[in-house]
Image (cartoon, rainbow, N blue to C red):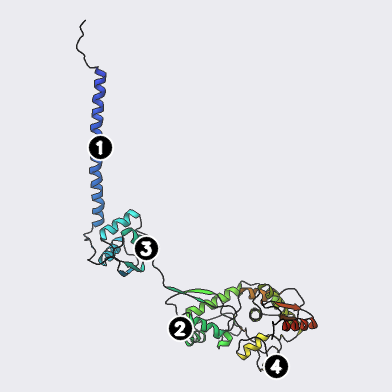
């Protein structure tokens, strides 16, 4: 049997033809996209260099050298790139500008003074400029209970200012307070207790008046946060509350005892008793030590609360927040006496004088008191 020569199926032939056409079209599309992409990239680079700006490239410098750069306020990515490239921080101003555009960081580069190094990558520089310049600051800590002269001494030790410069700022009107009852303080002692003890951060260029004004404003805020209505209903003023707070601060470092010491002060004032607080006599003597002698009790001073009735004329140190709160809200107890009875700094409180003497004698036997 013989067969006719095999002829291709017309339908299969058509399919193969269509596939060939699809392949050719795909190749042509890829080529077109590549051409158009290259043109778009060229147009983008052309856009960067439009306006006739020339590329600035880094001069021959060793990598890793520290460079101080100031980025002007409102500078464009192009201006910043030219500045960086001219100092050798980046390789090319145009490459830097392109990197900024790719990162979408054009509006995020912050002005200021920077310490950069030569040979940085564009991305690293962009990260630094987005974060912003490192501000030159320093910290000052003022502890609770310090007297005004001690406060100025601490500030002087932690800053570039002398005690005389700090005193001048307090007394020449540069620093103000609304807490002193007779207008602005006329001497250092009248500034006592009106600078809030805390830890503060200042710019390196801050002057002494800036430092002290912040301490003064902070004390005003802390006093304003306290509810003094109870104290005022007892016939005292918020300034007298600051005085009481300074006594509390000087007499105990135990937070739970602060309202108790405040209560002893309040109860004695209400009864017209002398406060007889050792810390006020030591303040009058300008000393810091434990215990008083009989001669100490004879000091002629309005701060000698053994010999003078009522509160001293000013605070005797800088009270912290806990002592201010205790002054405004003394404990509801009838205590009139307290004495140090433990080496851990705690006191014993009583309304009975004989029990007070017993506490005191026991503290001497235990070696707590001399």
Q: Could you tell whether 226 is left or right of 201 in the image?
A: right
Please say if 252 is above or below 108.
below
Q: Position of residue 281 (x, y in %)?
A: 66, 89
- Please give the residue where the numbered disc 1 appears in the rendered image: 29
Query: Badge 2 is on which residue?
Result: 161
- Whichever of callouts 2 and 4 sits on the residue coming sooner in the sequence is 2
Local secondary structure at mark 4 = loop
Q: Verify CB contact (< 8 Å) between mark 2 and mark 1.
A: no
* Residue at the (53%, 81%) spot, across then down: 176
SS for callout 2: loop
The mark lying in front, picked from 2 and 1, is 2
In this rendering, does residue 111 appear at all?
A: yes
- Which quarter of the rendered picture does the N terminus lie within? top left
CA gap between label 2 and label 1 equals 74 Å
SS at mark 3?
helix
Residue 280: where, in percent of width, then height? 65, 86
């Amino acid at each position: 049997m013989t067969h006719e020569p095999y002829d291709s199926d017309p339908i299969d032939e058509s399919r193969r033809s269509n596939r060939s056409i699809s392949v050719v079209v795909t190749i042509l599309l890829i080529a077109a996209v590549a051409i158009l992409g290259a043109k778009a990239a060229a147009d983008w680079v052309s856009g960067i260099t439009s306006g006739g700006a020339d590329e600035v490239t880094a001069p021959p410098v060793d990598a890793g050298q520290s460079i101080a750069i100031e980025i002007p306020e409102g500078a464009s990515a192009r201006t910043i790139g030219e500045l960086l490239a001219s100092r050798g921080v980046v390789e090319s101003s145009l490459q830097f500008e392109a990197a900024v555009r790719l990162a979408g960081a054009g509006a995020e580069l912050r002005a200021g003074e920077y310490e950069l190094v030569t040979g940085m990558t564009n991305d690293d520089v962009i990260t630094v400029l987005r974060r912003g310049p490192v501000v030159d600051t320093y910290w000052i800590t003022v502890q609770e209970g310090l007297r005004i002269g001690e406060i100025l001494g601490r500030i002087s030790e932690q800053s570039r200012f002398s005690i005389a410069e700090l005193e001048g700022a307090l007394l020449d009107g540069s620093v103000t307070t609304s807490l002193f009852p007779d207008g602005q303080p006329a001497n250092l002692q009248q500034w006592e207790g009106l600078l809030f003890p805390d830890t503060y951060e200042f710019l390196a260029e801050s002057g002494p008046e800036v430092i002290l004004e912040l301490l003064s404003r902070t004390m005003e805020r802390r006093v304003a946060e306290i509810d003094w209505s109870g104290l005022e209903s007892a016939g005292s003023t918020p300034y007298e509350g600051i005085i009481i707070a300074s006594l509390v601060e000087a007499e105990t470092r135990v937070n739970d005892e602060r309202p108790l010491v405040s209560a002893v002060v309040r109860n004695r004032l209400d009864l017209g008793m002398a406060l007889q607080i050792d810390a006020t006599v030591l303040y009058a003597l300008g000393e810091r030590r434990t215990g008083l002698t009989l001669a100490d009790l004879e000091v002629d001073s309005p701060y000698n609360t053994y010999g003078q009735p009522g509160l001293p004329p000013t605070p005797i140190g800088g009270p912290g927040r806990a002592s201010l709160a205790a002054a405004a809200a003394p404990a509801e107890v009838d205590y009139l006496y307290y004495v140090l009875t433990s080496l851990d700094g705690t006191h014993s409180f009583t309304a009975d004088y004989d029990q007070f003497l017993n506490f005191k004698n026991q503290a001497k036997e235990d070696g707590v008191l001399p």
